[in-house]
Image (spheres, rainbow, N blue to C red):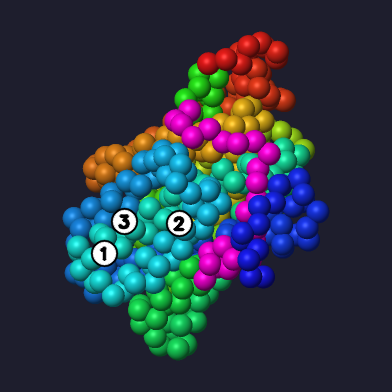
């Protein structure tokens, strides 16, 4: 294996390699490695900061704000790619996430947790940006929906394993935060190191532009990314919070709920990948957004009328299942993009996706105090807007035919 990372191998040639030695194998390992650190960090965060660092709502609010800043600044990835290859950059960021999680318990103070969270968040968000770009560069348009569905399943399985690791070490072996953080972070960092030295540098067929790319013809993709980020913030921040505040879910109950959703995605995500390949992006996104419209309305009614924890949990499952359909947003862009735009546009889109994350959770926190159901009704409104936008996607999107408002074959200039 030594020296393999010094090789540069064109993607066309790499396709002849066995699955786990080619680019798809590396994508699988990275998809499994990231959740090992991040899921453990998320699962233990609230208990750790209260028990060891004495956090109140003020400190956790600032911590979450700091955590989202690198996502908003993901466009900076474009300039960092002047210094390092994108594949190497992704692995550096993955290792950064792992190391930051590994040392989290060593700095149980407000300042210490801000620093480790910022470093880990840079690793997480910049890795996600580069990883999404590599996926679209390395996968053909025909195989992308199916492989992306499998990668979602791998990530879900890894998250399931991470939660199982917590339950095993916490309940059976009676170890503390420090050991769990170190183990989870170290496994992610080791996986990044393995990929660095085991795989050659895969050369994409088209050299990526190293500049900020904003094109008018991508406007629908930008709008859908913004809506996706806004809706996701409402779900991530308030769906599980409702289960705790309204229905009194304990930590084991919330952990169990999340483990079940991850187990479900292991099964359902590959099926959804094949469905996107067969039905097309427009149909898949319309199914997702109509489903989310129902889910958000139902969340509001569940809170308002107190229909019960079982219905709330069922909606949580449906929401997670629908999330897998979002892979069609990636494949839609892959079909309309200039191949040289994939890396810079992935960075721009990631920043657009996180615009809402900077202000929406804090703003909706005040709305939650006045009318919790209204928060979910706002999510339903965003889903309705997304339905209207996704209806503009052509049945067969392509450069020059990005929306139904453009005719196939017209100029694809800015």
The residues colored magenta run 190-213
Question: Is residue 225 in sight in this rendering?
Answer: no
Is the residue marked by circle 3 packed among few (<14), some (14-19), or many (20+) residues within 10 Å? many
Q: Which residue is mark 3?
A: 118
Disc 3, SS: helix
* 81 to the left or right of 26: left
Instruction: Name the residue located 71 percent from the left edge and 57 percent from the top edge.
Output: 22
Mark 3–mark 1 distance (CA, rounded to whole Å): 8 Å
Viewer-side residue, 412 vs 238: 412
Indicate which disc residue 113 carries.
1
Position of 360 relative to 341 (above/below): below
Q: CA distance from mark 2 to mark 3?
A: 12 Å
Residue 405 or residue 385, whichever sits in front: 405
**CA neighbours of label 1 inside 10 A, class few (<14), some (14 to 19), many (20+):** many
Does the segment drawn in magenta span residue 192?
yes
Q: Nearer the viewer, residue 190 or 233?
A: 190
Q: Is residue 143 in the magenta section?
A: no
Of the image marks 2 and 3, the number of the one nearer the N terminus: 2
Any mark on residue 235, and which? none
Of residues 104 and 48, the one nearer the viewer is 104
Q: Secondary structure at mark 1?
A: helix
Seen at 76% across and 39% down, the residue is 142
Name the front one of labels 2 and 3: 2
Q: Quadrant of residue 335?
A: top right
Image height of 208 relative to 170, above or below: above
> Can you give x and y, in whole percent of width and height, for residue 19 in the image?
75, 59
Query: Who comes first in sequence, dot 2 or dot 1?
Result: 2
The residue indicated by pointer 2 is 93
Q: Position of residue 320 (x, y in %)?
A: 55, 51
Q: In terms of image quadrants, where is residue 365? A: top left
Instruction: From this view, report whether residue 48 is shown above or below residue 217.
Output: below
**Rendered residue at 72%/41% (across/down):** 140
């Amino acid at each position: 294996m030594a020296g393999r990372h010094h090789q540069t191998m064109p993607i066309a040639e790499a396709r002849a390699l066995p699955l786990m030695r080619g680019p798809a194998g590396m994508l699988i390992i990275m998809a499994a490695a990231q959740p090992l650190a991040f899921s453990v960090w998320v699962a233990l965060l609230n208990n750790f900061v209260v028990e060891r660092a004495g956090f109140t709502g003020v400190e956790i609010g600032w911590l979450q704000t700091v955590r989202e800043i690198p996502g908003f600044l993901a466009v900076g990835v474009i300039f960092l790619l002047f210094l390092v290859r994108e594949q190497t950059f992704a692995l550096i960021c993955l290792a950064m996430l792992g190391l930051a999680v590994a040392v989290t318990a060593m700095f149980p103070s407000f300042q210490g947790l801000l620093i480790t969270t910022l470093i880990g968040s840079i690793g997480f968000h910049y890795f996600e940006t580069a990883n999404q770009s590599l996926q679209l560069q390395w996968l053909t348009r025909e195989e992308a929906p199916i492989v992306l569905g499998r990668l979602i399943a791998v990530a879900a399985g890894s998250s399931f394993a991470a939660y199982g690791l917590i339950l095993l070490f916490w309940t059976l072996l009676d170890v503390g935060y420090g050991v769990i953080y170190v183990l989870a972070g170290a496994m992610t960092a080791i996986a990044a190191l393995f990929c660095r030295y085991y795989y050659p540098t895969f050369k994409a067929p088209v050299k990526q532009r190293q500049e900020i790319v904003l094109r008018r013809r991508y406007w629908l993709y930008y709008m859908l990314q913004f809506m996706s980020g806004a809706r996701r913030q409402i779900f991530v921040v308030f769906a599980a919070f409702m289960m705790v505040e309204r229905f009194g879910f304990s930590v084991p109950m919330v952990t169990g709920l999340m483990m079940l959703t991850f187990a479900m995605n292991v099964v359902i995500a590959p099926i959804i990948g094949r469905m996107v390949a067969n039905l097309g992006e427009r149909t898949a996104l319309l199914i997702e957004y109509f489903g989310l419209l129902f889910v958000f309305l139902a969340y509001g009614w569940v809170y308002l009328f107190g229909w019960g924890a079982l219905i709330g949990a069922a909606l949580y499952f449906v929401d997670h299942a629908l999330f897998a359909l979002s892979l069609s947003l990636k494949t839609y862009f892959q079909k309309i993009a200039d191949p040289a735009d994939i890396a810079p546009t992935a960075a721009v889109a990631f920043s657009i996706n996180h615009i809402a994350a900077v202000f929406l959770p804090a703003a909706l926190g005040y709305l939650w105090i006045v009318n919790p159901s209204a928060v979910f009704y706002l999510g339903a409104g965003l889903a309705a807007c997304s339905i209207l936008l996704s209806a503009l996607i052509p049945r067969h999107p392509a450069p020059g035919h990005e929306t139904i408002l453009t005719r196939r074959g017209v100029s694809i200039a800015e």
